[in-house]
Amino acid sequence: MKRILVSACLFGINCNYKGKNNLNYRIFSLMDDFSLIPVCPEQLGGLPTPRPRAEIQGGKGWVPGSRVVNEFGNDMTTAFKRGAEEVLKIAKLFGVEFAILKSTSPSCGTQYVYDGTFNSILVPGVGVTAALLRENGIEVFSEDEIEYIGS
Ligand code: SF4
């Protein structure tokens, strides 16, 4: 059975920055055909829950040299990169081919992320973990693209 990484908050795990989740019941429809592995890169990177909101600076999502800063102006880049590396480690350990990641997150976003101004402005771009997984040949999809998994 193929293995898929899934953002843990989509499973109903209370790991998002508010200490809540982003439960999406469509994820459960995949359980008959795939082995699903929940991960939260921000927790794996050592960040607390709840935690301050964070956004990638620069308005382009995660690109080389980007920084992730929280709403108090603290540079959180190291923790976000550490979390992405831990998720990649899990992906390699389990031979994962795909990931379904929560849209717009500075870690998990696959198409759009917030622009770094904390003004709720989305821009095209990917989160830190989504970028690292893609760089390593793992296909990443948002929860809105579940129908493309495995096709
Ligand atoms: Fe969900 Fe990803 Fe944010 Fe963790 S880092 S709460 S898995 S979107």
Image (cartoon, rainbow, N blue to C red):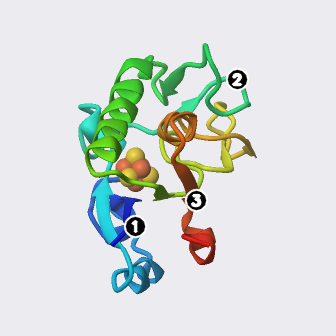
Where is residue 129? Give x, y as percent. Answer: 47, 38
Q: Is residue 11 above or below residue 18?
A: below
Helix, strand or loop under label 3: strand
Residue 58's tag is 2
Which residue occupies the foreground of this view, 75 or 144?
A: 144
Q: How far apart are the alpha carbons under marks 1 and 3?
A: 13 Å
Q: Amino acid at mark 2?
A: Gly
Mark 2: C-beta under 8 Å from nearest atom of ligand 1: no
Q: Earlier in the sequence, mark 1 or mark 3?
A: 1
The label nearer to you, 3 versus 2, is 3
Asked if residue 19 can be seen in this view, the reply is: no
**Label 1 lies in ligand 1 vicinity (Cβ under 8 Å):** yes
Image point 30% across, 36% down: which residue?
A: 89
Is 136 placed left or right of 116 in the picture?
A: left
- Give the percent coordinates (x, y) of residue 119: 67, 41
Residue underneath mark 3? 141
Q: Which residue is mark 1?
A: 10
Task: Of the two numbered discs 3 and 2 on the same chain, state the one appearing first in sequence.
Answer: 2
